[in-house]
Each structure stands twice: as structure tokens, then as C-alpha cells.
Image (cartoon, grey):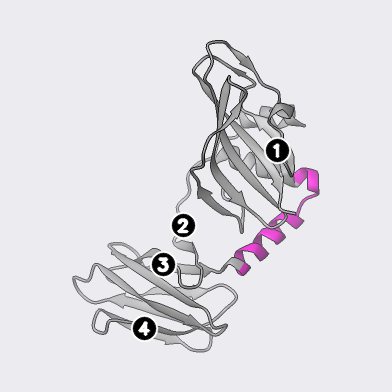
Amino acid sequence: MIKKILFGFGLLILAPCLFALQTIHVTDNVNSQFSIAANDYSRIFVDGDRIISFTSTKGLYDIRQDAINGEIFIKPASNVKQITGLITTENNHIYPVKMHVRMGDSQAVMLLSPDAYKQKARVWESDSTYQDLIIKLMQAMAGGEFPEGYQVKKVQRKSDYLGSVAKINLIKIYSGAKVSGWVLVLNNISHQTLHIKPYQLYRKNARAIALLSQTIAPQHSTLVYMVVSND
């Protein structure tokens, strides 16, 4: 299976896409940031919830509220560059937000709570068998994709070592419902060429491991993709 995945890496070419919709992960009492249009109303809504109020400094914006659908539409006043405030929802969530005013078309901003994006991750995961899910997640990590519902964040952790010949750093985590994906960098810190097998990098709860290259020249590095169970 690993060989098939690695072969797929060479064929995976993704073109960047631009979307009017911004999807923003939010957590209670943690600041979130997104952009809104300078000269038009931007739509803001919470997936799976309804906005009941937005509180901020008066005079910085005009607001229209759709009480039926639980959405708000905000247009900044002239020369306003930034709006900060609190969004309160029907399910008693409070989300501090910072809106950066940008020139351009009106924006649609969907706020995703942890429960909402985990549910989306469950749906994405349930569309495949367990083995196919692992392959899809490996391919997504290799291509820099964002699987639906997954939280993707860069991390900095203390290096782990493979004996005295290599060090390994976790640089990115794809957090899903049943499984998560790790992207690591393996650096050859020795003066000899290394031939690393996936099983040598096994960690607790690991379900699949693939190296972009199993042969690493002295003082060079390769990427490692690992799928781990969340159980």
C-alpha cells in the first residue's frame, strides 16, 4: 500500500482555487479573524447555529440582521480599516472576531465551531472504507489539500531522534474525527546515506506511514506522512 501511495505522490498536481466563501474555525472566547468588503455588505453566518447579536463600537459599520436564518450582513463605514466585536449565538456561544476591511467584492463568511467541523470530518471519513480513508488522507497531506471538516495547523515541537543519525520534527497536523494526519520532516544529521523503512518510524496509534523518499543523503531531509488513530 505504501508503494502505491508514494507512486500517487508523483502524479498529484493541484491547481490553486479561489473561493468567495471564507470558512473560519471559531472557538468560544478565542479571537478569530477574517476579511470583509469595504464597499458592500458581507454575509456572516454560523454553520449549524444562528447569530442572535453582534456587539461592537457604534458608528463603524451598518448592520442588517436576518432573524429568521440567524445571519448578519455588515458594511463598514467610510475609511474604517478594522472592526472588532462579539458574535453571540442561539446555542449560547460567544465568538470574538476581528474583521479586516478589504477592497473587493462582498464576502460570505461561514463560522465553524469545533462540533460543526468534527461532524463534517465524520461525513468525509464515512464516505470511504478505512483503508481508502488512509490513502485519501495521505494524498491530501502530500498535495496540501484540506479534507472537509479537518483542522489543519502548523506546529513546532521538540525534535525526536532516530539514534544518532536522524532527527524528526512534526510540522503540521490534520485533525479529523476518527483519524488525524501528521506531516513530519526527517533530517539526516549523519555523514552517511540513510535507508529508512516506514516501520522504523512507528509510533503509538500509527495506522500508516509513508516517506517521500526512503533514501536520504547526508545533511538532507525528506517528508514523512503518518496517519494516527484518535482512539
**Mark 2 touches mark 4? (CB < 8 Å):** no
Disc ID at residue 31: 3
Please tell me which residue is depicted at 57% across the width and 10% down the height of the picture.
Answer: 192
Q: Quadrant of residue 194?
A: top right
CB atoms at circles 3 and 2 under 8 Å apart?
Answer: no
In magenta stretch: residue 129: yes
Q: Residue at x 58, y 19 (%)?
A: 165
x, y percent for residue 179: 70, 51
The mark closer to the camera, 1 or 4, is: 1
- Specify start and end residues of the magenta stretch as a single range: 115-132
Q: Earlier in the sequence, mark 2 or mark 1?
A: 2
Is any part of residue 40 visible from this angle? no
Circle 4 residue: 55
- State the CA–CA distance, disc 1 to disc 3: 34 Å
| Cα separation between marks 1 and 4 | 47 Å
Residue occupying image coordinates x 45% and y 52%: 18
* Residue position for label 2: 19
Q: Secondary structure at mark 2?
A: loop
User: Hey, which quadrant is residue 92 in on the image?
Assistant: bottom right
* Disc 2 packing (10 Å; few <14; some 14–19; many ≥20): few
Identify residue type, mark 2.
Phe
Q: Quadrant of residue 198?
A: top right
Q: Is residue 36 magenta?
A: no
The quarter in which the C terminus is drawn is: bottom right
Label 3, label 2: how far apart the Cα atoms are = 23 Å
If you read the primary sequence from the N terminus, does the residue marked by circle 3 or circle 2 appear first?
2
Q: Is residue 73 above or below residue 149?
A: below
Badge 1: residue crowd in 10 Å (few <14, some 14–19, many ≥20): few
Mark 1 in CB contact with mark 4 (< 8 angstroms)? no
Label 3: element kind: loop
Position above or below: 57 against 8 = below
Q: Label 4 amino acid?
A: Thr
